[in-house]
Amino acid sequence: MDKLSINGGNTLHGEVAISGSKNASLPILCSSLLTSDSIALYNIPHLNDISTTLNLLNYLGVKHYWNKNDALILQSNQINCLEAPYELVKTMRASILVLGPLLSRFGEAHISLPGGCSIGQRPVDQHLKGLSALGADIRLEHGFVVARAKKLRGSSIRTDMMTVTGTENLMMAATLAKGQTILENAACEPEIVDLAELLNKMGASIKGYGTNRIIIDGVDQLHGAEHKVSPDRIEAGTFLCAVCATGGDIILHNVILSHMGSTVDKLIQAGLNIQFGDNWIKASMKSRPKAVGFRTSEYPGFATDMQAQLMALNTIAKGSALIVENIFENRYMHVQELQRLGANIEINGHSVVVHGVKNLSGAIVRATDLRASASLVIAGLIAKDETLIERIYHLDRGYDSMDIKLRNLGANIQRVTVDRE
Ligand code: EPZ
């Protein structure tokens, strides 16, 4: 398994192109199941969760290839399987996103339940509640969700909480249902807007996306379309956190500032200087960051996917910061690893207090989940001497060439390939 070796202390300088959004791409790939026509997707990032999703779609019979312009072409005119097996689903919970499309177009789907996740229980009960409301017969059999429906019927659905993939699953399912579906308490993340825009290009009739109330008028069938996936707001936020922690000045290209408002607000409070244009952000940092507290919440609040990265920044900030994680019940796995690097952090249930120290010192640490790995990378960039991060397959799930991009910005970071461990 690969490791990352980082010798901290370098400031970051230069330019970086932000990749397409992982969390927009995953549902968008699954939406290819809704039509027998081909769809062409641009700006899909090259990272492991994309490969995992393509493996699953391939298993179902979806054909895909990357064309010479790096567009991903998918076609679902030869679906020969309606089952997502545990072997594939256990490595990526977002596999649940094939449930809505398969059920809606083919009337049946057998999807393995994903099993545990390090950041929280992450049940899919709201996905199932919504599909039942659309008329599906849902059973849990031997670790599988077995869903059947002759024809889904539109309905009004209010989920118990705002769920990103729950909203995406139900929105996709409703596109081919008979009649109108109203999703109340829908999630508003930019990734949902991205998906809805593609679905409407494919002939769906969706309104209100980006708000808590989405209205979908079912249509008989969807057709092919082309779509460029939005930039990854979490990758962009991660780079801004990094330069705020190390000092320096960088320019991010291919970003949408309005998707990152809550993160940028907090980093400006920490002392980051920001300039921006249509699709670029220039960030510079000349002093030690100031501690900045935050509470995670649904979009447009502070993103839970940025919590670990901003915590890493706070470890060497001036002052103390109160952090409250309100979305997932166990998203503090990075705390113990940051403590190994010399961070002064107290966990009190759902909240954490970070007392900034002058500097961190390198150590061997272990990545536990995707955003925890990004947090350890940022800490490694500031820690004196060498930090060796193990299990960086977590990082490679959600970041496209993070180590290469950081090295190009002047970081002393190397990927160490270890054959056996
Ligand atoms: C999406 O996960 C993202 N993943 C996550 O990003 C992100 O952290 C999360 O949304 C919150 O923004 C993708 O989009 C692929 P939720 P999702 O359903 O949809 C509870 C990353 O690092 N819930 O919005 O799984 C759930 O337990 C990943 O890129 C239920 O109880 O998250 C959580 O506490 C990590 N029942 C809360 O709702 C359900 O049926 C929000 O979860 C569904 C959710």
Image: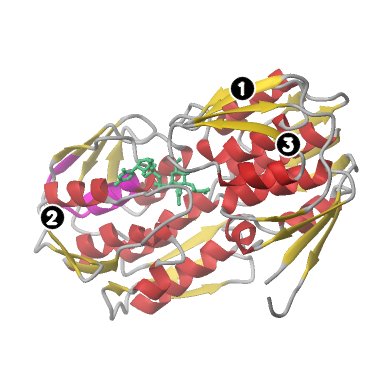
The percent coordinates of residue 88 (x first, y second) are 41, 72
Question: Which is more foreground, mark 3 or mark 2?
Answer: 3
Residue at image coords 85%, 33%: 247
Q: Considering depth in this image, is 182 or 1 the residue closer to the camera? A: 1
Find numbered disc 3 in the image and state the secondary structure of the residue it sits on: loop
Residue 167 falls within the magenta-colored stretch: yes
Q: Which residue is mark 1?
A: 293
Find numbered disc 1 in the image and state the secondary structure of the residue it sits on: loop
Q: Which residue is mark 3?
A: 343
Q: What residue type is disc 1 on?
A: Gly
Image quarter where the N terminus lies is: bottom right
- Segment tinted magenta in the rendering: 166-181
From this view, report whether residue 371 is shown above or below residue 321.
Answer: below
Q: Which of the two labelled residues, at mark 1 and mark 3, occupies the earlier sequence position?
A: 1
Q: Which of the two labelled residues, at mark 3 and mark 2, occupies the earlier sequence position?
A: 2
The percent coordinates of residue 48 (x first, y second) are 57, 65
Q: Quadrant of residue 142?
A: bottom left
Horizontal side of residue 7 vs 269, given as left or right:
right
Find numbered disc 2 in the image and state the secondary structure of the residue it sits on: loop
Q: Is the CB of the residue bearing disc 3 within 8 angstroms of ligand 1?
A: no
Q: Which residue is mark 2?
A: 152
The percent coordinates of residue 118 (x first, y second) are 48, 53
Is residue 24 visible in this depiction of the protein? yes
Quadrant containing ligand 1: top left
Residue 97 falls within the magenta-colored stretch: no
Q: What residue type is disc 3 on?
A: Ala
From this view, report whether residue 237 is shown above or below residue 387.
Answer: above
Tag of residue 53? none
The percent coordinates of residue 267 (x first, y second) are 69, 25
How far is the residue under mark 1 from the one under mark 2?
A: 45 Å
Q: Circles 1 and 3: CB distance less than 8 Å?
A: no
